[in-house]
Amino acid sequence: MALMEELEVLRTQTLGAIAAADTSAALELVRVGVLGRAGTLTGYLRQMGQVAKEERAAVGKAVNEVRAAVEEALVARKTALDAVELSAAIDAAAVDVTLPGRAQQRGTRHLINRIADEISEVFLGLGYTVAQGPEVETDYYNFEALNAPADHPSRSLADTFYVVDRSGDEVAVRGESDVLLRTQTSGVQVHAMEDQKLPIFVIAPGKVYRRDVADPSHLPQFTQIEGLVVDKGITFGDLKGTLDYLCKQMFGPERKTRFRAHYFPFTEPSAEVDVSCGICHGEGCRFCKGTGWLEILGCGMVDPNVLLMSGIDPEEYSGFAFGMGVERIACLKYNVPDLRMLVEGDMRFLRQF
Ligand code: DAH
C-alpha cells in the first residue's frame, strides 16, 4: 500500500535528519518541518478524512507510530545537543588562570594638589592651621573688608564674575553686599579674624575665579594659598623669615629671595617676593626673562584698617599676610612653560609628576 510505504520513507528520512542535526537550531528546523503546522507528518494527519474507511484504522495507527518515534528521537537528540552546547559555552567562558593579569591603570595625584599639599605641609610644620572660606563670596569679604576702595580696578565687572539672577540682575545679600565668585583667597583672612581667637596662624588654600582668558600665564580658575598671622609684636622681619623659609623648603636651600616694594590695599607696607631663578642661578636667562628672579607671591603687614574692620585693636596686635598662586609655583618648580598644561588633562604630561 502506497500510503504505508510513504510513511515508512518519511520515518526513515526524519530519523536520519534528526541524527544528522548538529545544533539545537538545526534540530528545531527538522521538528518544524515534520510536526509543525505545515509539517509533513501533520499533512498526513490532515488527510485522514480522505483515507478509505477500512484503511483508516491501520493508517492512523501507522501515523501515530511514526509520530511517537519522531518525538522520542527529537527529545533524545535535544538532550544530547544541549549537553554538548552547554559544555562548549562553559569552555568558551573559561578563564585561563595561567595568563598574566591585565594591569589596572592607576591615576596619580594631580600636580596642583600635590604642590598645594607641599606648601601646606611647610606651614603645618610651623604650627599654622588650615582655614577655609566659601568660593561664592560677598563683595564685603572679597573687597570691602580688605580695604579695597569702591573704585579699585579689581572690583570692576571686567575682572570679577558677579552672580546674577535669572533676569540678569546682580544678586545681593540683604540688599547690600553683591554676591560674586571670589577673585582671591584673601577674604578668608577676614573670616578667620571674625571667627577665631587670637593669636591667629592660618593658611587657606582654595580655588579663585577671574574673568581672564586662559593664556600661558592666566587661567580663569586657579588655586591660591593665603596666609595670615595676627599676634602681639609681629614684625616685617617675621614675614621675611617665614617666606624665605618657605622658598627654601619648596625650591631648595640654595635659592635666594628678594622683597620688592609693591601695593596691595589690605597690607601696608606691601611687597612682592621673588625667588632666584633655578635655571640660571640669578645670571639671567629666558625662563626668568633675563632678570635672574621669578615672582612667586604677594605679601605685607596687615593694614591697621583691616584689623580694625574685623574688630582687632591695631594698637595691641599686628600681623602679616601673604598670597600665592599654586599653579604658578608648580610651573616654576618644574619649568612648565604654560599654566594651561596643568588643566588640559593630558595624562602623558600629568603622569610625569
Ligand atoms: N590676593 C592677592 C592677589 O590675588 C595676593 C596677596 C597679596 C595676598 C598680598 C596677600 C597679601 O595676603 O598680603 O593678587
Image (cartoon, rainbow, N blue to C red):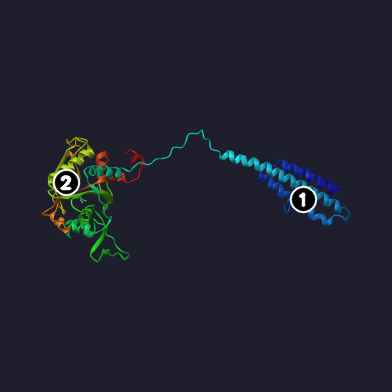
Q: Quadrant of residue 347?
A: top left
Looking at numbered disc 2 in the image, what kind of residue is underneath it?
Glu
Q: Which mark identifies residue 258? A: none
Residue 19 is situated, as x and y percent measured from the top left of the image, at 72, 41
Residue 259 is situated, as x and y percent measured from the top left of the image, at 14, 44
Classify 196 as above or below 339.
below
Q: Which mark identifies residue 272? A: 2
Classify 104 as above or below 183.
above
SS at mark 2? strand
SS at mark 1? helix
- State the residue at coordinates (84%, 51%): 59
* Res. 222 in view: yes
Q: Residues within 10 Å of mark 1 (few under 14, many from 20)?
A: many
* Res. 338 in view: no
Residue 251 is situated, as x and y percent measured from the top left of the image, at 22, 38
Along the line of sight, the residue nearer the viewer: 271 or 227 = 227
Tag 1 residue = 41
Q: Residues within 10 Å of mark 2 (few under 14, many from 20)?
A: some
Along the line of sight, the residue nearer the viewer: 22 or 172 = 172
How far separated are the C-alphas under marks 1 and 2?
A: 100 Å
- State the residue at coordinates (19%, 40%): 245
Check the image and name the residue furthest to the right: 54
